[in-house]
């Protein structure tokens, strides 16, 4: 049973005052005010209802919370009392609305009184700072309940102790926070509350509803405001629990849009890093999206990549939230690690958020290179497939793993028969050994050893895939670029094959418009041309020289062979002339375009100049490529 003796004595004294009205109500509200002034929690509990006590009275913490509320100072003077009757029994008074004024400014406040039990004394059930607050049910008890939970939450976060932080949170928020280790949670709490010094100041426009509440606390250094901390609560019976908090800082990179989301995304990021460094693919499969894991990590050699590591602390991390995306960024020396995550759909209403890693990028601050893990590991798979296809001469796989430019310039024109004449495409039948990866802007260059041959495979991202854009190999007689060398050599091989097989449409397709007009448009074949030009095309490739719009390809040597002159026409290299070589002397070399044009002009292709025929001897044997 509650003790009401102090209140009764106070009321007795008031009754001695002549003209005293509303004696019971005055006695109750003035005792309430006195208990608040004296910070007497025991008497406060005696003079308030069970609901008020359960919501708002927690010993000294209540009076600490009351300092955050703009309560008027002074003793209340009752000016009006209205009985509130039972809706079903209009004679039964169930509560009282007591209007009182306080202080010199006679500020009006409203008390709601109820009986303690059926026949017990009247006690304070709630307090409202204005008649408008009374109509809107903005009660002091509800505010105190939220403020008490706010104090409990802030004290827990400032302590950095895992058990206290989780105990003050809703189950869903606690679930997100529990994904962090005790040390990580302590560091996270320090990041959020580290700038909170001095007294707590509640900002205006706090929102307290039946089941949820939100308020903001000013953060300042001295008299200068540096930001605010926003706390969100959900009601749990008579108490409130912290469901989320956000930090809005005036310092760049310090904002935390949602601790609930950030903690879940950060936990996934930290688990990813630990699992990656340990080569733990089972954990990686749990924390990564299926496409990222299966397409990049499942079959990858994780030891090929070193993730930047800033150290055990989290002071340097930054977490950005945008819609259902989260980005975890941490700087370590001259490198920056960025982990991209996507929030997964909720399995149930208000469930703890879940994030999965779907991309990881290492940014080199000194060279401004972006190193994407998905690109790197898919690039290795692409390189293996491409090199194997070169060995087996599988044109379809080469096309599938090449960029659009590489396909247009080389692989869409290549057939198996071409490979014998393309020495730059020959590789040993061995699995490539990956030596080093270099990132050069939009290109990735992987250095490998294929057998004993060192190669640089150049890749470019295209259509979401890393595709081979070129292959660089040591070469002194022709360009190191396979794309450049093959692009020039393919029309030469087609031209030679076309002449050998008397396929003039092929020859015309490989020749410039000028060469075709003076020669091939007038011929159906070379059956009567002596010596036959294709006999000079058998020797192996000697050299390729190349400029932007011109190229020269030499087959054989000074003794026997051919020199092809090519010009870029309509975006493709075409044969513009061929010099047939039967020896080192000038009279042993002949330009094919001029020779054919001359013979056509004479009207008799079969009539060759005897002296020319004598000195222009057809080679006796052919050297294969």
Image (spheres, rainbow, N blue to C red):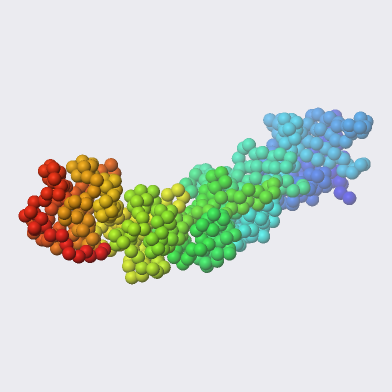
In screen coordinates, is 303 left or right of 526?
Answer: right
Does any portion of residue 491 appear in the rendered image?
A: no
In screen coordinates, is 299 left or right of 571?
Answer: right
The residue lying at 13 percent from left, 42 percent from top is 603
Which of 296 and 612 lies nearest the eye of the viewer? 612
The residue lying at 78 percent from left, 42 percent from top is 32
Which of 67 and 154 lies nearest the eye of the viewer? 154
The residue lying at 10 percent from left, 61 percent from top is 584
Which of 505 and 280 lies nearest the eye of the viewer? 505
Task: Tell me residue 613's x, y (percent).
Answer: 10, 55
Q: Is residue 541 above or below residue 225?
A: below
Q: Quadrant of the C terminus?
A: bottom left
In screen coordinates, is 123 left or right of 142?
Answer: right
Task: Tell me residue 530's x, y (percent).
Answer: 16, 54
Outermost residue toward the left in this view: 611
Q: Is residue 149 above or below residue 622?
A: above
Does any portion of residue 388 appear in the rendered image?
A: yes
Task: Tell me residue 112's x, y (percent).
Answer: 80, 36
Task: Tell me residue 257's x, y (percent).
Answer: 56, 46
Image quadrant assignment for residue 119: top right
Image quadrant assignment for residue 145: top right
Q: Is residue 549 above or below residue 278?
A: above
The residue lying at 11 percent from left, 43 percent from top is 602
Query: How many callouts does the rendering have?
Result: 0
């Amino acid at each position: 049973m509650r003790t009401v003796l102090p209140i009764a004595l106070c009321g007795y004294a008031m009754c001695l005052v002549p003209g005293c009205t509303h004696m019971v109500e005055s006695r109750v509200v003035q005792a309430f005010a006195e208990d608040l002034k004296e910070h007497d929690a025991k008497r406060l509990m005696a003079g308030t209802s069970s609901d008020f006590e359960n919501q708002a009275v927690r010993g000294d913490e209540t009076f600490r919370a009351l300092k955050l509320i703009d309560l008027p100072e002074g003793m209340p003077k009752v000016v009006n009392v209205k009985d509130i009757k039972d809706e079903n029994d209009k004679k039964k008074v169930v509560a009282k609305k007591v209007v009182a004024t306080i202080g010199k400014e006679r500020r009006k406040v409203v008390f709601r009184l109820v009986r303690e039990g059926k026949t017990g004394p009247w006690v304070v059930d709630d307090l409202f700072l204005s008649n408008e607050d009374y109509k809107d049910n903005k009660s002091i008890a509800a505010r105190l309940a939220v403020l008490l939970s706010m104090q409990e939450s802030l004290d827990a976060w400032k302590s950095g102790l895992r058990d206290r932080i989780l105990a003050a949170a809703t189950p869903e928020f606690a679930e997100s926070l529990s994904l962090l280790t005790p040390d990580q949670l302590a560091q996270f709490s320090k990041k959020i509350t580290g700038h909170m010094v001095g007294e707590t100041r509640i900002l205006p426009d706090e929102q307290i509803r039946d089941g949820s509440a939100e308020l903001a606390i000013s953060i300042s250094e001295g008299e200068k405001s540096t930001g605010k901390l926003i706390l969100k609560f959900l009601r749990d019976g008579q108490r409130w629990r912290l469901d989320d908090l956000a930090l809005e800082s005036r310092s760049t990179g310090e904002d935390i849009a949602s601790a609930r989301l950030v903690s879940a995304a950060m936990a996934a990021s930290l688990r990813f890093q630990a699992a990656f460094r340990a080569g733990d693919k089972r954990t990686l499969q749990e924390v990564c999206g299926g496409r990222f894991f299966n397409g990049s990590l499942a079959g990858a050699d994780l030891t090929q990549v070193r993730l930047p590591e800033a150290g055990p602390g989290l002071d340097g991390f930054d977490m950005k939230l945008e819609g259902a995306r989260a980005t975890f960024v941490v700087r370590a020396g001259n490198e920056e690690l960025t982990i991209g995550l996507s929030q997964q759909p909720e399995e149930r209403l208000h469930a703890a958020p879940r994030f999965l890693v779907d991309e990881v990028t290492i940014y080199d601050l000194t060279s401004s290179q972006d190193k994407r893990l998905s690109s790197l590991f898919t690039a290795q798979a692409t390189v293996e497939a491409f090199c194997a296809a070169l060995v087996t001469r599988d044109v379809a796989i080469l096309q599938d793993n090449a960029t659009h430019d590489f396909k247009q310039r080389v692989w869409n024109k290549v057939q198996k028969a071409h490979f014998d004449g393309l020495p730059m495409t020959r590789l040993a039948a061995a699995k490539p050994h990956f030596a080093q990866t270099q990132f050069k802007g939009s290109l990735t260059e992987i250095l490998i050893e294929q057998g004993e041959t060192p190669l640089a495979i150049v890749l470019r991202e295209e259509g979401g895939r890393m595709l081979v854009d070129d292959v660089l190999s040591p070469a002194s007689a022709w360009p190191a670029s396979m794309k450049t060398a093959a692009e020039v050599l393919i029309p030469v091989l087609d031209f030679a094959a076309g002449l050998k097989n008397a396929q003039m449409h092929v020859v015309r397709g490989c020749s410039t418009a000028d060469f075709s007009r003076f020669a091939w448009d007038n011929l159906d074949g070379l059956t009567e041309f002596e010596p036959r030009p294709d006999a000079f095309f058998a020797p192996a490739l000697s050299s390729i020289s190349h400029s932007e719009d011109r190229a020269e390809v030499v087959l054989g040597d000074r003794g026997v062979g051919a020199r092809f002159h090519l010009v870029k026409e309509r975006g493709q290299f075409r044969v513009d002339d061929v010099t047939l070589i039967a020896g080192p002397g000038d009279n042993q070399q002949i330009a094919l375009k001029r020779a054919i044009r001359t013979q056509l002009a004479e009207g008799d292709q079969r009539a060759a100049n005897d002296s020319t025929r004598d000195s222009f001897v057809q080679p006796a044997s052919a050297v294969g490529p």
